[in-house]
Amino acid sequence: MSSCVFCMIARDEIPAKRVLENDAVIAFDDIAPQAPVHVLIIPREHHADLGDHVPAETLRALFEAVPEVAAIKGVEESGYRVIVNNGRDANQTVAHLHVHVIGGKAMSHGMVAFEE
């Protein structure tokens, strides 16, 4: 997708503070972090969301990168949250599959908030 911001990051057309990359995925710091550690992991190939016929090897690569990112960012011992927002109701703001790795401070118990 030529106009997808995450595809543009994957093609090095937009700079990002990369944390990890390999043949399948790129991990980079979120530009609007919700915690001291907030990294996005994206597949290099474009998939809008989890329902976009994502190959199993792509899903595996995304989630294999999670503990690597946590170790690089120093939150593997203290803990971190892994989130995939999928679609409009989940507030997925970029239509390119991505995994959030969030940590660096204690989080509240509740995971979900709904708009009234």
Image (cartoon, rainbow, N blue to C red):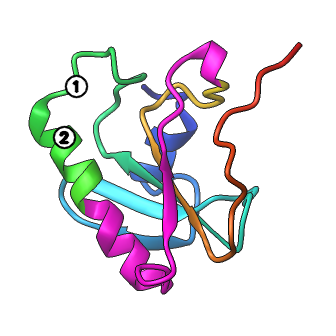
Q: Disc 1 vs disc 2: Cβ atoms closer than 8 Å?
A: yes
The residue carrying mark 2 is 58
Q: Residue furthest left?
A: 57
Observer-nearest of 99 and 15: 99
The residue carrying mark 1 is 54
Q: Is residue 75 left or right of residue 93?
A: left
Residue type at numbered disc 1: Val
Which of the image's four quarters has the C terminus?
A: top right
Position of residue 44 measured from the top left corner of the image (x, y, whole percent) = 30, 45
Position of residue 5 measured from the top left corner of the image (x, y, whole percent) = 57, 39
- Identify which residue is drawn at 31% across, 69% down: 67
Position of residue 111 measured from the top left corner of the image (x, y, whole percent) = 64, 41
Magenta span: 65-90
- Identify which residue is drawn at 14% across, 29% down: 55
Residue type at numbered disc 2: Thr
Figure check: 94 above or below 72: above
- Identify which residue is drawn at 61% across, 27% down: 92
- Identify which residue is drawn at 22% across, 16% down: 53
Location of residue 114 by image quarter: top right
| SS type, badge 1 | loop
Find the distance from the CA under tag 1 to the CA under tag 2. 7 Å
Location of residue 71 by image quarter: bottom left
Mark 2 neighbour class, 10 Å CA radius: few under 14, some 14 to 19, many 20 or more: some
Figure check: 6 above or below 65: above
Location of residue 29 by image quarter: bottom right
Which of the image's four quarters has the N terminus?
A: top left
Q: Is residue 74 left or right of residue 89?
A: left
